[in-house]
């Protein structure tokens, strides 16, 4: 029953969190956001004390159930493994392997040190929650929306308007490639080698494994009943059961209970095991050697991390040498880079699709983090969705009133490119789309009006840039490296002017 309960809970959580990432129509309740907040890395980065303590207690009491029930990447590997069993002619038999402790802790050292010196891109790539989020958003979401659009076409043809068409374009080629590589690489490992990724590369698995060695409840042998038949070992996808020696490496056990179900003699069970330590791999001499290797690896990693990515915005910048725009609530580039792991939940949830994964806008250290682009729309004046869904604290929650004064960038006007000024034709589109009246139309020649800007009340929403009909954009938003507070604007009555039949 333990295995069936575990599979049922895992299937529910996996389904809900996947749909939450895919849900572009906001049909799922906002309360499902807690599924992202209970992930290990987001809980740590957001300094969510309650969740951090809860996850530590969970590991110390029940072992690595997080990896089998809560972590979407862990469950994804189980799904791949189950599919693999359907296609195999022979049942896969796992064999005990010694733990790759040096590799596991070296990865943790590299992740921690790189994060501390200002290169969170490595943490973002290896965090299992963020990696799964990118997989869903970059690879599955376009397919999901295409399916929606197909249903929309079919239903609309019968006069039913239940579905509506959405943009199914790929957000970024680079993140699509990384998403596909993640999908294929981890899927291949799961297909061939079970939970190898969790117990060799995943930093979360390594840290939770350390705690799980001391958990109150663990899978243990009943030496009087065991006849060393190896059935438990053959079914252990974590390679952590040595049936001959009747020992279990609890640092790698993901508490999947496959071993318990496979045993015909009830010689292995999940029970209270406080104070018991049957693992030969954690003898004092081995632990001391591991600590020495870990510390030396950490020091070497510190030297190896390039100083070019240490706490700076480096590398190539975006077009026109602009300072990139970070989402409202992110406080600026430094705060975003300190906390964001590029899970792309904000990108998926943005209702106007203006959040895109960065390429070189923030430099190498900020690769794949969200940035604002106004080619397809602009930031809605009253929208605070991205600040509500971010689980890491990279985008802090904003009220609508706070959003109205959050200045992510400032308007820049180049009159030489403005068709109203240059060609002496009527326009005014930028002023019509400015929610704060930071862009207004002022008299120029006779009945002709041209734009005028006031940066003090601009919030950088991009409405003017998006709607500007000039190809080179006569008006655009320059990002604030650190967000500022815009001044309150006074609502002024808009004056009617002759548009000259321009179309705005």
Image: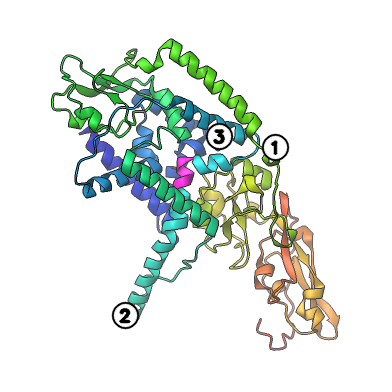
Looking at the image, is 219 positioned above or below residue 374?
A: above
Distance from Cα at disc 3 to Cα at disc 2: 54 Å
- Mark 1 burial class by Cα count in 10 Å: few <14, some 14-19, many 20+: few
Residue at horizontal 66%, vertical 49%?
363
Q: Return the x and y of residue 246 as percentages of the image width and height.
A: 25, 18
Residue 77 in the image, given as x and y percentages of width and height: 35, 43
Secondary structure at numbered mark 1? helix
Question: What mark, if any, has residue 111 been given in the picture?
Answer: 3
**Quarter of the figure that contains the N terminus:** top left
Q: Position of residue 4 (x, y in %)?
A: 22, 38
3 or 2: tag closer to the N-terminus? 3
What segment is highlighted magenta in the picture?
127-132
Query: Which secondary structure is most common in the magenta stretch?
Result: helix
Query: Looking at the image, which residue sits at the far left?
Result: 264
Q: Which mark is residue 169?
A: none
Q: Which mark is residue 307?
A: 1
Quadrant position of residue 149: bottom left
Element on which disc 3 rests: helix
Residue receiving disc 2: 158
For the point 40% across and 43% down, the residue is: 73
């Amino acid at each position: 029953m333990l295995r069936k309960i575990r599979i049922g809970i895992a299937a529910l959580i996996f389904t809900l969190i996947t749909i939450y990432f895919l849900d572009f129509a906001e049909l799922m309740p906002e309360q499902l956001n807690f599924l992202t907040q209970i992930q290990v890395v987001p809980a740590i980065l957001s300094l969510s004390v309650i969740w951090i303590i809860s996850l530590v207690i969970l590991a110390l009491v029940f072992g690595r159930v997080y990896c089998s029930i809560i972590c979407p990447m862990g469950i994804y590997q189980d799904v791949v493994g189950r599919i693999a069993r359907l296609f195999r002619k022979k049942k896969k038999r796992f064999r005990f392997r010694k733990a790759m402790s040096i590799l596991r802790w070296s990865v943790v050292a590299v992740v921690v040190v790189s994060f501390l010196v200002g290169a969170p891109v490595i943490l973002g790539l290896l965090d299992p929650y963020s990696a799964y989020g990118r997989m869903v958003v970059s690879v599955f979401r376009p397919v999901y929306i295409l399916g929606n659009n197909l249903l929309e076409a079919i239903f609309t043809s019968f006069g039913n308007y239940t579905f509506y068409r959405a943009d199914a374009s790929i957000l970024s080629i680079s993140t699509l490639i990384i998403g596909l590589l993640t999908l294929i690489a981890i899927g291949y490992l799961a297909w061939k080698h079970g939970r190898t990724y969790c117990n060799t590369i995943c930093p979360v698995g390594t840290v939770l494994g350390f705690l799980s060695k001391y958990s109150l409840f663990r899978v243990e042998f009943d030496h009087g009943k065991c006849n060393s038949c190896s059935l438990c070992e053959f079914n252990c996808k974590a390679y952590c059961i040595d049936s001959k020696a009747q020992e279990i490496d609890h640092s790698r056990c993901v508490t999947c209970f496959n071993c318990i179900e496979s045993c015909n003699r009830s010689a292995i069970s999940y029970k209270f095991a406080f104070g018991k330590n049957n693992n030969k791999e954690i003898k004092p001499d081995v632990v001391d050697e591991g600590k020495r290797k870990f510390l030396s690896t950490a020091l070497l990693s510190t030297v190896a991390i390039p100083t070019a990515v240490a706490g700076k915005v480096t590398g190539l910048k975006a077009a026109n040498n602009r300072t990139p725009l970070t989402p409202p609530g992110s406080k600026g580039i430094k705060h975003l880079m300190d906390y964001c792991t590029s899970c792309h939940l904000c990108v998926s949830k943005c209702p106007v699709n203006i959040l895109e994964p960065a390429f070189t806008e923030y430099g190498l250290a900020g690769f794949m983090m969200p940035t604002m682009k106004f080619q397809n729309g602009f930031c809605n004046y009253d929208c605070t969705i991205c600040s509500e869904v971010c689980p890491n604290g990279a985008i802090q929650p904003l009220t609508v009133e706070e959003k109205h004064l959050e200045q992510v960038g400032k308007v820049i006007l180049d009159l030489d490119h403005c068709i109203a000024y240059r060609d002496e034709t009527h326009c005014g589109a930028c002023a019509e789309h400015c929610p704060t009246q930071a862009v207004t139309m002022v008299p120029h020649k006779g009945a002709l009006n041209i734009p005028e800007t006031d940066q003090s009340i601009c919030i950088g929403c991009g409405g003017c840039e998006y709607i500007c009909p000039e190809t080179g954009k006569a008006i655009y938003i320059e990002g604030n490296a650190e967000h500022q507070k815009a001044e309150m604007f006074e609502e002024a009555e808009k004056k009617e002017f002759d548009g000259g039949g321009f179309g705005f």
